């Protein structure tokens, strides 16, 4: 099994959270995309408020938007240059991934406190056209959570990112790695993903 999360500021009922809780505690692997760093947004005093830190306890990411971790981004008009972190170049998840590529995602700030201790950063992002002073930040990492579950997290995941061959291969590799399967050494080529992106008019 592999649970994939792409959430943003949800307020799920307790019975649904119970399923997620049981899955996490089973030690099975999880994969998270982008806004999953701030997956839930329960108000102070709500008995479910601990879930606001889901990104932290499931993925070793900041525990929600803003806060003490100062989790933020560098503007909706910015994009990100991505490079492989040299120390991680031989990690199976990076098999065949281009050493440098560009993504539409605006860069998320997770440093200096995240990724969490014990994580293996894989990719570094540099903000292009930021709206404030920017520092390079990890944009993908692996981690083992407190229940022994493998975690793969990326702060990339803008809809247009999925059209990039390097990102496609990264995700396919990560799925295989998390499931304990050999990462494909051969690649059939870029997949056509032509889903319109934009808000309804």
Image (cartoon, rainbow, N blue to C red):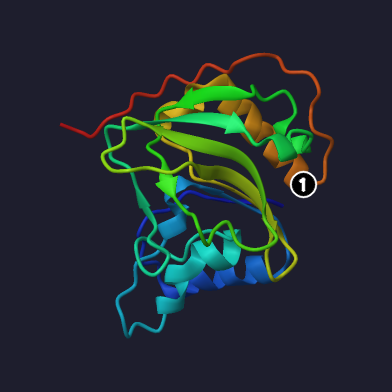
Q: Residue at x 35, y 59 (%)?
A: 9
Q: How many marks?
A: 1
Name which quarter of the figure residue 70 lies in. bottom left
Name which quarter of the figure residue 27 lies in. bottom right
Q: Is residue 107 above or below residue 129?
A: below
**In terms of depth relative to the viewer, which is nearer, 180 or 83?**
83
Q: Which element carries disc 1, helix, strand or loop?
A: loop
Image spot of residue 77 (x, y percent): 27, 32
Q: Is residue 16 visible?
A: no
Asked whether, in this view, residue 122 is left or right of residue 106, the answer is right
Residue ID for mark 1:
179
In what quadrant of the picture does the C terminus appear?
top left
Q: Is residue 185 above or below residue 86?
A: above
**In terms of depth relative to the viewer, which is nearer, 56 or 190?**
56
Q: Is residue 186 above or below residue 158?
A: above
Q: Is residue 86 above or below residue 148?
A: above
Q: Residue at x 63, y 71 (%)?
A: 22
Q: Residue at x 58, y 56 (%)?
A: 115
Q: Residues within 10 Å of mark 1 (few under 14, many from 20)?
A: some
């Amino acid at each position: 099994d592999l649970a994939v999360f792409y959430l943003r500021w949800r307020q799920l009922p307790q019975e649904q959270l119970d399923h997620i809780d049981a899955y996490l505690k089973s030690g099975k692997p999880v994969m998270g995309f982008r806004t999953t760093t701030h997956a839930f947004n329960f108000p102070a005093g709500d008995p479910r408020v601990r879930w606001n830190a889901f990104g932290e306890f499931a993925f070793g990411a900041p525990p929600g938007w803003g806060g003490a971790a100062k989790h933020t981004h560098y503007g909706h008009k910015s994009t990100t240059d991505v490079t492989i972190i040299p120390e991680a170049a031989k990690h199976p998840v990076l098999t065949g991934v281009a050493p440098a590529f560009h993504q539409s995602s605006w860069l998320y700030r997770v440093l200096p406190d995240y990724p969490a201790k014990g994580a293996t950063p894989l990719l570094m992002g540099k903000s292009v056209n930021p709206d404030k002073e920017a520092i390079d930040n990890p944009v993908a990492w692996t981690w083992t959570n407190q229940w022994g579950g493998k975690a793969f997290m990326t702060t990339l995941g803008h809809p247009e990112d999925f059209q990039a061959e390097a990102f496609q291969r990264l995700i396919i590799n990560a799925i295989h790695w998390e499931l304990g399967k050999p990462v494909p050494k051969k690649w059939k080529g870029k997949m056509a993903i032509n889903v319109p992106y934009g808000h309804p008019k």
